[in-house]
Image: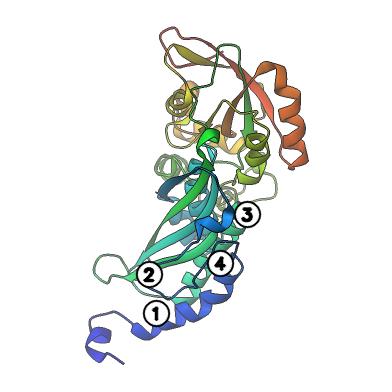
Amino acid sequence: MPQAYENAGVSVEAGYEVVKRIKSHVARTDRLGVVSGIGGFGGLFDLASLNYKEPVLISGTDGVGTKLVIAKLMGKHDTIGVDCVAMCVNDVVAQGAQPLFFLDYIACGKNDPAVLEQVVSGVADGCVQAGAALIGGETAEMPGMYDEDEYDLAGFTVGCVERSKIVDGSAIAEGDVLIGLPSTGVHSNGFSLVRKALFEQAGYTVETRLPELGDRTLGDVLLTPTKIYVKALMPLFEADLVHGVAHITGGGFIENVPRMLPEGLAARIELGSWPVPPIFDVIERAGSVDHMEMFNIFNMGIGMVVAVPADREDEVMNLLANAGEQGYRIGSVVARGSDGVELA
């Protein structure tokens, strides 16, 4: 055992224990194309085994942000990994790609094998949902950089799409219908405001129960994992039904929907056309946030916006239903005035 390193605050033995604990979770994510198990210097993936004709790789990286504070307050770390995977794979699937593999990065003040196993189990759960293999990762124990009970989590994913099937929004046309796919709640953005509004201004705690939230505590609602939309969207891509996709993350509708729109077009969003989860009303009230500003911060109940031809809306809805997903017609594509998004 490297005693000098131990004396400096880094436990090599704890690192070995983490690797031992996570192997079974990693194994659950195995898929066609995986060449190597964990433990090598790099993760190997055989793209040729998937028989793409003109493969284009699409990559994405993201973290979970200060939602980690909620996990710490709850002492519950087995779902935050799902959030990390979701934030990455939802970005690449928004351009038509099937996620292939994922790598995670965990930085912590003290290596706690029990906690880190929970985190990685969630990462593996997310990978299974997305159809991606967990082929590697890094756990960095950094005493002095983080408190002993603190950690940060980030991830990286690579997906693949045929060149002819890339979804970049260029096919979007005036008159296209906008279909919203519901979120599970706040997802993983806006938590700095969430914590300020709910905990500092309103004086709530993670154990607070509110009538609007039913039988769940505030912490349980906030910690609900980000939805992964891969299995809902892939059948739409395969049927050539999608003109564009916007992943509604930080910046809400106002910043994310225009990212998929060609120049000269805007999105008219029909407020009231989908159910808004009650947690957003709680945040708005507790933080005295302007209602319209909420749409520039949060997803407000819609995690993905999909632009489709108006005459194929029924096909889209049927495929979503077959995938177990609810779709809402939330608006349409119109000629652009002054704003990229019109909230009507």
Q: Earlier in the sequence, mark 2 or mark 1?
A: 1
Decide: few, some or many residues near mark 4? Use Cα within 10 Å; few <14, some 14-19, many ≥20: many
Give the label, 1 or 3, closer to the camera.
Answer: 3
- Mark 4 vs mark 3, CA separation in Å: 12 Å
Cβ atoms under marks 3 and 2 closer than 8 Å: no
Look at the numbered disc 1 and give the secondary structure of its residue: helix
- Where the N terminus falls, by quadrant? bottom left
User: Three-letter amino acid code at disc 2?
Assistant: Thr
Give the label, 3 or 2, closer to the camera.
Answer: 3
Q: Earlier in the sequence, mark 4 or mark 3?
A: 4
Res 156 → quadrant: bottom left
Q: Is residue 205 left or right of residue 275?
A: left
Identify residue for label 2: 139
- Mark 4 vs mark 1, CA separation in Å: 16 Å
Look at the numbered disc 3 and give the secondary structure of its residue: helix
Q: Earlier in the sequence, mark 3 or mark 2?
A: 3
Look at the numbered disc 4 and give the secondary structure of its residue: helix
Identify residue for label 1: 15
- Mark 2 vs mark 4, CA separation in Å: 14 Å
Please name the residue shown 68% across and 33% down the image. 239
- Residue 187 screen position, x and y as percent: 53, 44
Decide: few, some or many residues near mark 2? Use Cα within 10 Å; few <14, some 14-19, many ≥20: some
